[in-house]
Amino acid sequence: MKRRLPLLLSLLLLPGLALAGEPVDFHYANPQVLAATDSATAGEAWFARCAAGGQFADLARGYAPDPRLTRAQREAAEKGFDRSLFEKIAQSTYDRVVTDLPQGRLTLCVDFTAPDDAFTRDRMQGVIALTAGSGKIIVKLHPQADWAKLLPYVLAHELHHSYWAQEHFRPDAAFTLADYLVFEGRADYYANQVFGAHPAPWIHALDDARYTATLAAFRPNLGQTSPQVLMGSMFGNPQAGIPMWAGYSVGYRLVAARLDGKPRDWAAITAMKAAEFIPAE
C-alpha cells in the first residue's frame, strides 16, 4: 500500500536540489531466500554480497536473513513492500549525504524482520540498520511499520559511518569507549542537522540528571576497549545501572555541545579526535 510522503521526503525527491551520487546498488535478501533450496548457501551468498571485505563485516553476521521467518511471512512481507518508495528515499538520501561526505557507490542490502518483532516495529520506528563497512549498509524493515518516516535519518547515520570507515578506519588502532561515544554521536548529530529532527529514541534516552550521572560513570572507562564495556555502555547494562541506549544519548549530547552554533565542515568534523568532544571535569 502506498504511503503518503511527509514534506521532508517530498523535498528530498525533487530533482536538482542535490548533486546526485552513484546509483545505489540495491540487493534484496527476501527474493534470494525464497528462491534458495539451501538456507546455508543463501546465507553465504548474502554475506559475500552485503558484508565481505567490509571493515565491520563480523558485526554484520547478526543481520543475516533470519531463518525463523516462514515462507508465508516472507511472501506476505514481499507483497506489502513498496520497493519503489524505498528506492526513491534511499537514493535521494545517498545523493544528499555525498555532497557533504563524498564516498563511493553504496551497496544497500534490504531484508525484513519478523512480524512479531515489536521492538523494531514500535521502539525503532520500523527500521534497523548496520554499516558493514565503507559502501556496505544493511537495513531491516518491519513489514507492518511506517518505516519511511525514519529511513532518511537512519541511512544518513549509517552513511556517516560508511564515510568514516572509508577515511579514518585503521585496523591496528584501538577503538575506545570515548571513540565509540563520539562515533555514534557524530553520526546522529549529522543526520539530525541535515535531515531535521526525527523521532530517534536512542539520542533522547536520558534526562539531564541521568545524563550527568551516566557521563560521570563513563569517565573512568573512556579508555577501555573491551567489548563488554563498549556494548554495555552503548546499549545499556541494567546490572551496572546503565540505562538502555545510554551511550548513544551521551555521545549525541557530547557532540552537540561541542558543535552547536559552530561552522560545519562535515568532513573536517568527522576527522576530529574523540578527545575534542570530551569536556574537562
Image: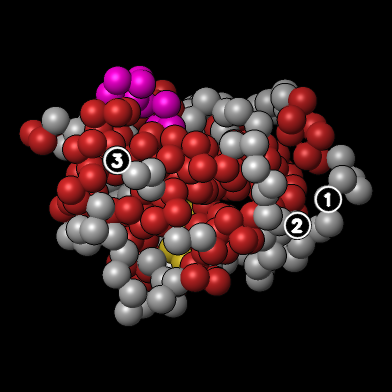
- Rounded to the nearest angstrom, the CA distance separating label 2 from label 1 is 7 Å
Which image quadrant: the N terminus? top right
For residue 211, which quarter of the picture? top left
Q: Is residue 10 left or right of residue 184?
A: right
Q: Secondary structure at mark 1?
A: loop
Which image quadrant: the C terminus? top left
Q: Residue flagged by tag 1: what amino acid is it? A: Ala
Span highlighted in magenta in the image: 202-210
In the rendered image, residue 163, in percent from the top left (x then y), is placed at: 57, 63
Q: Which mark is residue 99?
A: 2
Which numbered mark, 2 or 3, is in the foreground of this view?
Answer: 3
- Residue positioned 51% across, 42% down in the render: 258
Q: Do labels 2 and 3 touch, CB within 8 Å?
A: no
In the rendered image, residue 157, in percent from the top left (x then y), is placed at: 54, 47
Is residue 182 within the magenta segment?
no
Q: Do labels 1 and 3 touch, CB within 8 Å?
A: no
* Nearest to the observer: residue 42 or residue 215: 215
- Residue positioned 54% across, 71% down in the render: 166
Q: Which residue is mark 1?
A: 18
In this rendering, does residue 188 appear at all?
no
* Nearest to the observer: residue 228 or residue 260: 260
- Residue positioned 43% across, 68% down in the render: 51
Which numbered mark, 1 or 3, is in the foreground of this view?
Answer: 3
- Rounded to the nearest angstrom, the CA distance separating label 2 from label 3 is 37 Å
Q: Is residue 175 left or right of residue 34?
A: left
Number of residues whose C-alpha sits closer than 10 Å to that of mark 3, classed few (under 14), some (14–19) or many (20 or more): few
Q: Residue flagged by tag 3: what amino acid is it? A: Glu
In the rendered image, residue 12, in percent from the top left (x then y), is placed at: 78, 39
Of labels 2 and 1, earlier in sequence is 1
* Nearest to the observer: residue 206 or residue 215: 215
Q: Which residue is mark 3?
A: 281
